[in-house]
Amino acid sequence: MQSDQAAKMSSLGLSAWYDQKQALDNVTIQMRTNSITAIIGPSGCGKSTYIRTLNRMHELIPRATVTGQVLLDKEDIYGPGVDPVMIRRRVGMVFQKPNPFPTMSIYDNVAAGLKLTGMKRGRNLDDIVKSSLEQAGLWDEVKDDLKKPGTSVSGGQQQRLCIARAIALQPEVILMDEPCSALDPVATAKIEGLMTTLKEKYTVVVVTHNMQQASRVADYTAFLYLGKLIEYDETTRIFENPKQDLTERYITGKFG
Amino acid sequence: MVSFGRGDSTFKLIAGILAGSALAILAVSGYTLLTGALPVLNADGLYFFFGTNWNPVIGREIFGALPYLLGTLVTSAIALIIGVPISLGIAIFLSEMSPRRVRVPISYLVELLAAVPSVVYGLWGVFVFRFYVIDYIETPLSNYLGWLPAFSGTPFGLDILSAGIILSIMIIPTVSSISREIITAVPNSIREGAYSIGATRWEVIRNWVLAYGRSGIFGAVILGLGRAVGETMAVTMVIGNTVGPAAVPTSLLKGGQTMASLIANGFIEASPGTLEISAYIGVGLLLMIVALIINIGAQLMVTRVLKVKRGAIE
Amino acid sequence: MNSYRLRRFKDRLFSILGLLCVIIAVIPLGSILLEVIVRGAPVINWNFLTQTPGAEGQSVGGIGPSIQGTLILIGLTSLFGIPIGIMSGVFLAEYGHNKFASLMRLFNDVLTEFPSIVAGVTVFLAVVLYFGHFSPLAGSIALSFILIPIVARTTEESIKLVPNSLREASAALGVRRWRTTVSIVIQAAKAGLITGSLLAVARIAGETAPLIMTVLGNSYFFQGFGQPIDALPLRIWRDALQPYPDIQAAGWGAAFVLIAVVLTINIGVRLVARGRHGFGR
């Protein structure tokens, strides 16, 4: 595998457990700067667990543990003295089901992360909220409704609001955990289009069960099966010329 | 759906009638108290609600319930001011912050506070707690804040402040367990969203969990208020039991009386058929009305919130 | 980043404050239990548990009548209160999806928080005055105002946990619905019903306020259904008001007995439930 682009983030020998049950087994993947890496695999393969280890959301689940390393710019995010709070500001996340904050307005949904660090209301904040919503392709649709609750817009808009919420923090990596699985095809197309523009500024990792989606948007694709990394390569190679028999059978729909 | 056969409608009817027993009890209480209170309401009119004298001497009878209404409000307010922050702290600690292993044992311990009978709180209050209150709470208050009317008087331990503090302990299990239920019902997706933008655990609780559970927690607080308002024996034993204008709660460091403690102390001494017993019944009616308003409000709030939020999770 | 350190500090601070709240709440519990044991346990002996109180100025005597009275009150109240409570709980669970039932559920919840002293005044007016005497029955009726809603609530909750498949299986066998309810559903929910009833009994065992004006309290063993009787909580209250240290000690002894019963039920029920359902909710 060529390494002409630097790895923004990589997992090295990463294993994860829920209680006694192992969900990931020795997974090593490199996610390159300004590219989209897709994680595919049948349900239960550990892809959601994997993406949640990348910003330490995994550990919010009781009795969940991790071994191995996740490097963000060569620094281990599981290293001693590293605060997950700091990691999550650099590694944003978008969830399977859109989860805008119901008690907050659209504006506050986007501004919430910045307010935590003490940023006050004002021109500066307004500008960031506007540009985040613009980058998420939502500004024109909601600019007159910024004071309405975040949950008042449609499902697809909610998901783009969640993307804007992540962008507002100016993260380096954006993780997307099956971001379109709860959306209709039109909304899905919008999010996919968004992903390709996002990668110009950010490194994007997306979990998907939808292989067409992976082949459409991803530069690199990793195939996980039963917690193990089966194959990882450029997306075109994975889909046109997989090395592993298991990968071939999965992408041709023989199982999963 | 199973169709109704022989016996089914009879069974449903009987069960339905018995399910109405709560309503029947409330209705009977309301009716008997109202008829029992009519004599004093006729004799004293509005004075009963706004007057402060309490004189059972035949021929000079006059009964004003204001001091006891105020006593109930002031002791309950103290109970909430002290008890609610502690209860919320417990609820937050047990649902969000503590290690999972200790959650169940600690919540059992806190709930045991509700199992201790009120009269035992009173016994403990009179012989044990009273002296701690004098030494560590009332004496400092009196020394440093004695110039405030609210803290004037001699630390004695059997007064409105003592009653309020005991009440605050007694409402903790109610407020904390219901708040905990409300907090647990906050959807996890909200917590995840908040964590994902780099919120600390406390920020997640403060800005998201409490904001989302606000109305339910408010209901829990009101339910605690309802409990404080109706609580009788512990208050009766530590509040100092003054009657008449002296019972108006002008200072926390003097004896007072709540509606419930007034009845507990004096009801049985009054002779049936007199205006005096009617006055006690009138105070009972007042207490019932206050308690009903508080509890119906709180129940509606809590059940509505839990229903909506459970729906949101599923 | 400066604000970041402040945020982390706040996070720690509030964890500690939360723990502090728990400790603040548990201290009174510990103190109450400790004092009840230290002051109450020494006076406990067979005579204390079985004798009547002595005349004033003489020996303190025992709390026999108070124990007997409390047992009689619990028995009488349970006798009619528990069936009523269970039946209303059954109704709320099995036929509870309509306006009438949700209204009844609301009233039931409201009654759970009803001031018990008001129940006493009501029963005094409606029962004591009507029959012309204080009586164990009047006391039981007042206590049932407290017991019924608790039993109804726990019954409803445990019956709702019975899986629908059980009801369907029974219906498929051609069993009428009410027979299914009585012999299948209630059987399946039996443990919950017993738990709820025991907790309700523990609650009324310590109730004092409604007894003041319904059973009055006295110093004698049961003298008939038309006479006042004593009860443990009443005895504790009376003894606490006395200036004599030995009588106060008897009050602590009575509190020891009462707390022992109430806490045994409460803790026992939890331990059994935990053994059955596993740890936690």
Image (spheres, grey):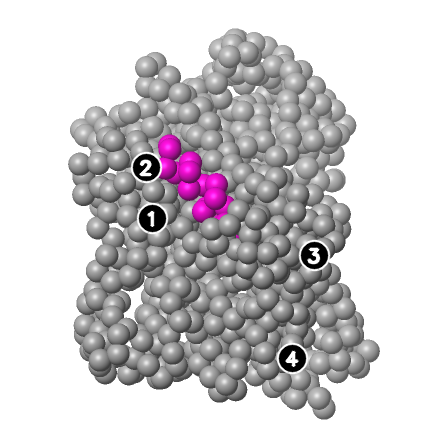
| Residue behind mark 3 | C49
Are discs 3 and 2 less than 8 Å apart at CB?
no
Q: Position of residue B188 (x, y in %)?
A: 51, 42
Q: Residue at x 31, y 76 (%)?
A: B276
The subunit letter for the residue under badge 2 reads B
> Is residue A69 left or right of C183 when viewed as pictured?
left
Using the image, determine if residue B280 lies above or below residue B6. Answer: above
> Is residue B93 left or right of A111 when viewed as pictured?
right
Q: Position of residue C36 (x, y in %)?
A: 59, 44
Label 4 amino acid?
Gly
| Residue behind mark 1 | B159
Neighbor class of circle 3 (other Cα within 10 Å; few <14, some 14-19, many 20+) is many
Neighbor class of circle 1 (other Cα within 10 Å; few <14, some 14-19, many 20+) is many
Q: Residue at x 55, y 12 (%)?
A: A79
The subunit letter for the residue under badge 3 reads C
Segment colored magenta: B119-136
| Residue behind mark 2 | B138
Q: Viewer-nearest of labels 1 and 3?
A: 3
Label 3 amino acid?
Leu
**Quarter in which the N terminus of chain A is drawn:** top right
